[in-house]
Image (tube, rainbow, N blue to C red):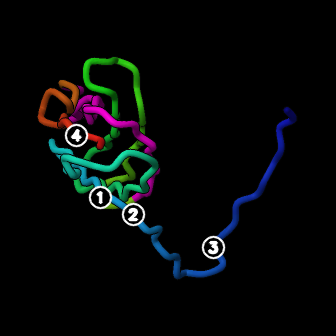
Amino acid sequence: FEPGFFRVGPAQDDEVESPESDYEIAVGEYYIELPKEIAVGPHTFSLTNEGEQDHEVLVFEKGSEKESAYALAPVPGATAWVTFDLEAGKYVVACHFPDVKKGKIGEPHSKLGMRTTITVK
């Protein structure tokens, strides 16, 4: 493997189409909203950070500490797209970022409500 270099420049067009998404995920202080049941296989999710803090989306099979999928939420007010490919089972979806208030670091977001369970069929 040999490293390479590339240059990033301005977009050629102001109009950029959003990708098609199969499911939507919304995160904020202190919630994660997504369908409680999704289909097996690869799906594109739109991931919107409706909060004022940074968030992440960790997906791991219930009863396991093995991470199945991961995504950083975009900056507050923005949407990003991510593809997760999940097998059948029950999964926990959580944000473990620490809460930040007035410059102080607090409990993980998962302890403040940013933890839910979904079923993949």
Secondary structure character of the magenta stretch overall: strand
Q: Which residue is mark 2?
A: 21
Q: Earlier in the sequence, mark 3 or mark 2?
A: 3
In this view, the residue farthest toward the right is 2
Residue 25: percent from left, percent from top: 28, 53
Tag 1 and tag 2, C-beta contact below 8 Å? yes
Q: Name the residue beneath numbered marker 3.
A: 11
Residue sitting at x 24%, y 56%: 50
**Tag 2 secondary structure:** loop
6 left or right of 52 in image: right
Judge whether 61 appears above or below 18 on screen: above
Q: Residues within 10 Å of mark 3 (few under 14, many from 20)?
A: few
Q: Amino acid at mark 4?
A: Ile
Q: Which residues are magenta?
A: 80-106
| Pointer 3 with pointer 2, Cβ within 8 A | no
Q: From where the camera sits, is residue 52 visible? A: no
* Relative to 84, residue 116 above or below: above
Mark toward the viewer: 3 or 2: 2
Q: Which residue is mark 4?
A: 118
Specify whether 26 is left or right of 9: left
